[in-house]
Amino acid sequence: MNWTSLLSTMAGALIGIGSTMVADRSRWKRDRRDHEQDVKRQVYAEYMAALSRSRREIRFAASEPGMEVEQRAQLARESFNGGSKYELRYQISVIAPEDVVDAAATAFHALRDLQDRVTEGHLRDSKPYALAREEYDRSFADLRHRIRSDIGSGNPRSAMRKRLPSSPSA
């Protein structure tokens, strides 16, 4: 019996099995990382949408001068408390890096401050409302920037332009 061919066959089989295991492990890690990124994207998008919805509703409450003060305050409170901002913020605290968690909390508190200005009776054209709105806008932009950095999306507008075909020349 020729031991050399038997050992060569066994070595080839072990190398084949080993390389398959390494490739499978690598594929599993990549799939897991992709899944984690997809979960982050979904939670981030839902959180930002919830903040935006509340911001729009608070703006509506602050834009209605004919509305009774208590009715305006109630609408502002309901718009802030509605949605799933609290739950999504807690999810972010588990899955996101610390800078995104901090930015999410800052945007949340800035939105609550904006709601407080409306609850206090300030309308959209008042100085306290304008200051609170500017602070919210800054904190929301910072959150968006940190989220983009975390998920590696960069500037979506420039990425979109790269994908769009150029228009034909006249």
Image (cartoon, rainbow, N blue to C red):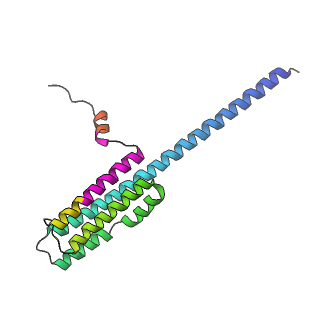
The quadrant in which the C terminus is found is top left
**Left or right: residue 32 compared with residue 73:** right
Q: Is residue 146 located in the magenta-colored stretch of the structure?
A: yes
Which of the 4 quarters of the picture holds residue 122?
bottom left
Front position in the image: 99 or 70:
99
For image coordinates 61% across by 36% down, the residue present is: 23
Front position in the image: 80 or 133:
133
**Left or right: residue 109 compared with residue 128:** right
Residue 70, position as x, y percentages in the image: 20, 79
Magenta residue span: 135-157
Q: Is residue 34 above or below residue 107?
A: above
Residue 80, position as x, y percentages in the image: 30, 69
For image coordinates 17% across by 68% down, the residue present is: 62
For image coordinates 32% across by 71% down, the residue present is: 81
Q: How many marks?
A: 0
Q: Is residue 55 above or below residue 144?
A: below
Which of the 4 quarters of the picture holds residue 137?
bottom left
Q: Is residue 139 above or below residue 81?
A: above
For image coordinates 23% across by 65% down, the residue present is: 57
Q: Is residue 120 located in the magenta-colored stretch of the structure?
A: no
The quadrant in which the N terminus is found is top right
Most common SS among magenta residues = helix
**Left or right: residue 169 compared with residue 96:** left
**Left or right: residue 69 compared with residue 50:** left
